[in-house]
Amino acid sequence: MSQSRNIPPTVLIIGSGVFGLGTAYALAQRLEYRNTKITLLDRLEFPAQDASSIDSSRIVRPDYPDAAYSKLASQARKYWRRDFGADGRYTESGLCLLLDETDENNGRDYLNKSLENVRDKLGLKVGRREEGGKITVLNDLSDIREVIKGMDGDLGRCGYVNWTSGWAQAEDAMKYLRTLVEETGRVKFRRTELKQLLFKNGDTVEGAELTSGEQVTADLTILATGAWTPKFLDLRGIASASGQILTYLDLTQEEQDRLGSNPSILNESNGMFIIQPSNRVLKVARHGYGYANPTTIPHPERPESGEEITVSLPRTKTDDPNLNVPLEGTKACREFLARYLPDLADRPFTHTRICWYTDTPNSDWLIDYHPKYKGLFVTTGGSGHAYKFLPIIGDRIVDVLSGKDRNQFGAELRKKWQWPKQKFRQDHVWTDGWRGGRKGMVLDEELTRAKL
Ligand SMILES: Cc1cc2nc3c(=O)[nH]c(=O)nc-3n(C[C@H](O)[C@H](O)[C@H](O)COP(=O)(O)OP(=O)(O)OC[C@H]3O[C@@H](n4cnc5c(N)ncnc54)[C@H](O)[C@@H]3O)c2cc1C
């Protein structure tokens, strides 16, 4: 990394999701940035309803095969257990990770390594919950049925429950963080849309050009536009938007009472998951390879050149209010329901949503200065797992930004998040080991198929 770490007099953060808002909060609190003017802009009113960071729930778990994320998640959880998670923003329901007999996506490896980490590196006690166990290993279907009540379907072959995992009310916690940022009085919020970065001399970014035509200059521009980021930089082979399916259905009070104290369920063999039902709503979703939405755009770094590139970008209900999950996706959720909760298999979905991951080839985030453009720092690449770090992610981002590690394993994290030396040869369709659904699905093809 070659960029100067001088304290910038002005910082422009673009994107107010977990990465952007988290960065704003950490910057606003650090003494060395006390004279820095911080502006945070987003294209939509906060909370942006199609942002990845905004939803009814996100799983909070230290269950990672990678010990660094596991430890980082366990640090974040301390905050979830305190103020951050108060007033219903965090529920420590437990998380049950399951495997099927057939495990085409190699979720077994992910699960076994995660178990090793939480047991051996985090030191969580193994045993039955009633006996103080934090991790309960499930060796067969009857073990699974003992921890998941009121579901007598074909739940899986084996797995474990981590009783120290839970879920966050994602939108509420984002609102909580926004209030904390507002209270610092240090951040100017603007609702306005980035058109393109302001490139100068082919080696510097000086701020942003907005769709209104206005130019906002800054000594440091921080791009935190989530799955939209490939619209503003050529990230082919580095980061790409993949559309993931979410479905919601209403429960009766009797069903809520029957299912409401269960842990959330993650099937690592097919990527399907059910969050602990709350307020009589059940959410069924898939951690999948997702849909690509190939879009041809002017080359974002050379917009005047006439050159075009094709990248996957989000399409959301903001673009098309009638956009719903394709039939392929609702079928996957129905089949999962038919297996786990047969009595709900035909219950209409109250709504469905395609929510966009910013995938990287190995699911590590991308948090670094741009290797080519001075004045540009990029923080994205959540890859479907960054939400849980909300209370601490900004601090880690500012560690990288300022070159000062405050975390005991900061150097290890910095290495993971650094700008890749090589682009992956294929753009899109990468895997972190346990994605579900078909590989290589294209959103338009799946939407058309549904109409045939
Ligand atoms: C379906 C789904 C399930 C997930 N489940 C989990 C989970 O259980 N646990 C977990 O830890 N993580 C989970 N994640 C991942 C987590 O939610 C994301 O990693 C995280 O929210 C990404 O934050 P972000 O800031 O990168 O993106 P976003 O939250 O999308 O923020 C990007 C912001 O940039 C703004 N923006 C975009 N373009 C422009 C522009 N031109 N001008 C101005 N602003 C712009 C957008 O409006 C948006 O507000 C899940 C993600 C999805 C999609």
Image: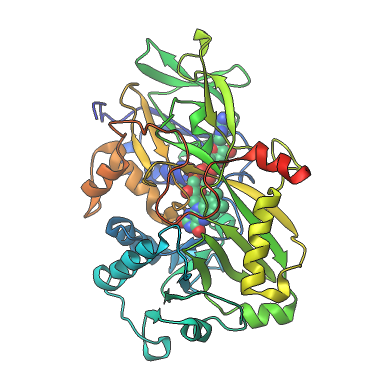
For residue 301, which quarter of the picture? top left
Above or below, 201 against 445 in this view is: above
Q: Position of residue 324 (x, y in %)?
A: 71, 47
Above or below, 48 against 154 in this view is: above
The residue at 53%/25% (across/down) is 310
The residue at 65%/74% (across/down) is 341
State left or right for residue 8 relative to residue 279: left
- The extreme bottom residue here reads 131
Q: How many marks?
A: 0
**Towards the viewer: 445 or 13:** 445
Q: How is the image coloured?
A: rainbow
**Towards the viewer: 28 or 208:** 208
Q: Position of residue 220 (x, y in %)?
A: 38, 27
Above or below, 304 against 430 in this view is: above
Quadrant housing the C terminus? top right
Q: Position of residue 177 (x, y in %)?
A: 50, 52
Above or below, 90 against 394 in this view is: below
Quadrant housing the N terminus? top left
Residue 185: in sight, yes or no?
A: no
Residue 219: in sight, yes or no?
A: yes
Q: Position of residue 146 (x, y in %)?
A: 51, 86
State left or right for residue 200 relative to residue 265: left
The residue at 33%/47% (across/down) is 396
**Towards the viewer: 418 or 279:** 418
The residue at 62%/79% (across/down) is 259
